[in-house]
Amino acid sequence: MALPNSALIIDDEQHVRVYAMQLLRQAGIHACLEAGDAELGLNLFREKKPELILIDLNLAGPLSGMDVLKQIRLEDEAVYAVIFTCEASASAVMAAVNAGADGFIRKDTSAQQIVRQLLEIVADPDEDE
């Protein structure tokens, strides 16, 4: 499994960004950037080119996490884009998948399970061949 070397967390709550950074480090990803709003997140994405992005759906401000996801997918189809949110509705999951999310992880999932899900998302599908 080739882990991403870098990650970007886009969430408007600082404690969530700190928590997500700890989880990414547990998963083996140590170069982590963080953004408290969509605009800064998009700027960091463009400037730093992280390999994995965790995006909250419910960002404060004019742009939502879904807007961020759609813009990222327009600019880069290869980056791992994972929705990391409290939203749990089937419609939110389907909208994220349809917009190009590689994964959808609820924030209230256990830390161990979040790390496992992140590792599954970035696992090389050709690894078993």
Image (cartoon, grey):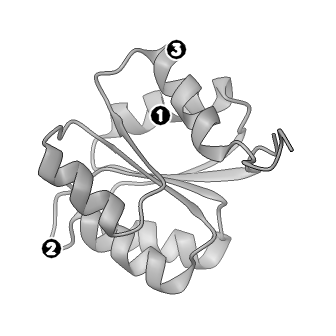
Tell me the amino acid under the disc marked 1: Ala
Q: Amino acid at mark 3?
A: Gln
Q: Residue at x 83, y 43 (%)?
A: 127
Comes first in the chain, label 2 or label 1: 1
| Residue 37 visible (yes or no) | no
Residue 80's x, y, as percent? 57, 58
Q: Position of residue 11 (x, y in %)?
A: 33, 49
**In the displayed structure image, the side of residue 105 where residue 66 appears, left or right:** left
Would you say 78 lies left or right of 86 here? right
* Residue 48 image offset from top left, x and y in percent: 66, 70
**Residues at discs 1 and 3 in contact (Cβ within 8 Å):** no
Kindly identify which numbered label has been placed on residue 36: none
Residue at mark 2 to residue at mark 1: CA–CA distance: 23 Å
Q: Residues within 10 Å of mark 1 (few under 14, many from 20)?
A: many
Residue 96 visible to an observer of this rendering: yes
Residue shown at 66%/60% (left/top)? 51
The label number, if any, that marks residue 112 in the structure image: 3
Q: Of label 1 and label 3, which has the lower sequence position?
A: 1
| Local SS, label 1 | helix
Residue at label 2? 62
Depth check, mark 2 against mark 3: the one in front is 3
Residues marked 2 and 3 touching at CB (< 8 Å): no
Q: Residue furthest bottom?
A: 74
Comparing 114 with 21, the one in front is 114
Residue 20's tag is 1
**How many angstroms separate mark 1 from mark 3 (CA)?**
12 Å
Crowd around label 3: few <14 · some 14–19 · many ≥20 (10 Å): few
The residue carrying pointer 2 sits among few (fewer than 14), some (14 to 19) or many (20 or more) residues within 10 Å by Cα, namely: few
Label 2 and label 3: CA atoms lie apart by: 33 Å
Q: Is residue 108 left or right of residue 24?
A: left
